[in-house]
Image (tube, helix red, strand yellow):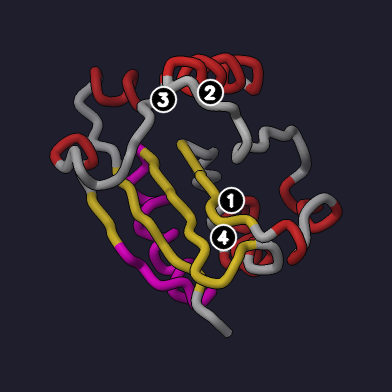
Amino acid sequence: MLGVAKRTIDAIYNEAKKEVNNVILTRYDIECILKILNKEDEIEGIYINFCNPWPRGKHHKRRLTHTKQLEQYKEFLKDNGKIYFKTDDDNLFEESLNYFKEANFQIEKLTRDLEAEPDFWENIETEHEKMFKEKGIKIKACIVKKQIE
């Protein structure tokens, strides 16, 4: 998947005649993210696209949007930095909205039908997104902002 992502990013930037200078792709255990990122990295945005919903209750803490994980992101996300989140999973989306509030992120924008809101954000359609849309599954999305603490 990282290879596909890299080729897609390269193609988009090449088409715009720009150098890729603001994207990091990594394969790393998310629970150890603070071993590779910290406050000095000043990350402006995190994109969480179609992550594993971990539907069983005992696995919820593994979610990339779980409160426990959001607290780690706050360590390297700049003040007013944003998380861009999209999913096909209704349950994950609704529970993630609660996680964002618990972790003191401000919900700036949300939609339960991304396709119906073309100006929601500068969206790059993923393969998963295209597949779900073809099946008639609505894509849920939100933008949340880290509060200044």
Q: Please, what is the three-letter code of the amino acid marked with disc 4?
A: His
Q: Please, what is the three-letter code of the amino acid marked with disc 2?
A: Ile
User: Residue 38 versus residue 139: which sits nearer the camera?
Assistant: 38
Q: Is residue 141 magenta?
A: no
Q: Residue furthest front?
A: 17
**Nearest to N terminus: mark 4 or mark 3:** 4
Identity of the residue drawn at 52% across and 63% down: 81
Q: Which residue is mark 1?
A: 64
User: Residue 64 versus residue 143: which sits nearer the camera?
Assistant: 143
Query: Looking at the rendered structure, which numbered label has been put on residue 9?
Result: 2
Q: Residue furthest bottom?
A: 149
Q: Which residue is mark 3?
A: 126
Question: Which of the 4 image quarters holds residue 22?
Answer: top right
Q: Position of residue 57 (x, y in %)?
A: 54, 55
Tell which tag, 4 or 3, sits nearer the viewer.
3
The reply to whether discs 1 and 3 touch (Cβ–Cβ < 8 Å) is no
Q: Residues within 10 Å of mark 4 (few under 14, many from 20)?
A: many
**Nearest to N terminus: mark 1 or mark 3:** 1
Tell which tag, 1 or 3, sits nearer the viewer.
3
User: Residue 13 versus residue 60: which sits nearer the camera?
Assistant: 13
**Nearest to N terminus: mark 2 or mark 1:** 2
Q: Residues within 10 Å of mark 2 (few under 14, many from 20)?
A: some
Up/down of 51 relative to 40, above or below: above
Query: Disc 1 to disc 4, how far (Cα)?
Result: 6 Å
Query: Disc 2 to disc 1, how far (Cα)?
Result: 22 Å
Q: Which residue is mark 4?
A: 66
